[in-house]
Amino acid sequence: MTIRNSRSQVETVCLSGNVLYRDGMFEAVLDVLEEEAQDDLIERFINWIQEREGQGDLEYKLAQAGYPGVDESTELVLEFRAADEPNL
């Protein structure tokens, strides 16, 4: 992911997080991010999903990433951990 702003350009951002399988679904929990970064990531996540759905390869891309069995009825959740929450 590349983030550009008026002050500088960051070439790579590494987001630390955990992916868990609970109650029949995968949960991706990212460590604390500022609200603006969360909003940007949510927008990019939604855009990526919409692009993949438009291309008809969302299930394939998620299976390649290690999440087989995703289909149209699968709920995709992007969850952010608050600063006061313990690590998983």
Image: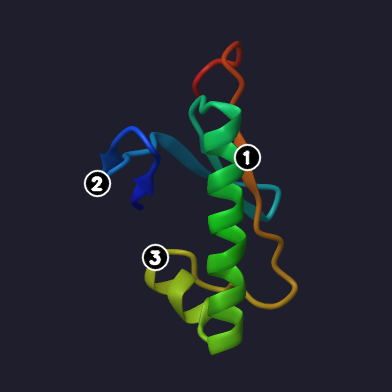
| Type of amino acid under label 3 | Ala
Q: How is the image coloured?
A: rainbow
Q: Residue at x 62, y 61 (%)?
A: 46
**Percent x, y for residue 63?**
45, 73
Circle 2 packing at 10 Å, graded few (<14), some (14-19), many (20+), is few
Give the mark, 3 or 1, whose residue is nearer the N terminus.
3
Report if residue 24 is visible in the image.
Answer: yes
**Circle number at residue 11:** 2
Helix, strand or loop at mark 3: loop
Which residue matches tag 3?
65
Other-residue count near label 1 (Cα within 10 Å), few / some / many at <14 / 14–19 / ≥20: some
Query: Mark 2 or mark 1, which is nearer to you?
Result: 2
Q: Secondary structure at mark 1?
A: strand
Q: Are marks 3 and 1 in contact (CB under 8 Å)?
A: no
Q: Is residue 65 above or below residue 57?
A: above
Left or right: 39 in relation to 6: right
In the displayed image of the protein, which residue is found farthest to the front? Answer: 6
Instruction: Name, please, the residue furthest toward the bottom.
Output: 56
- Is residue 29 depicted above or below 65 in this figure? above
Q: Earlier in the sequence, mark 3 or mark 2?
A: 2
Q: Nearer the viewer, mark 3 or mark 2?
A: 2
Residue type, numbered disc 2 = Glu
**Front in this rendered view, residue 85 or 47:** 47
The residue located at (24%, 46%) in the rendering is: 11
Badge 2 element? loop
Given the image, on which type of amino acid does mark 1 rest?
A: Glu
Identify the residue position indicated by label 1 in the image: 79
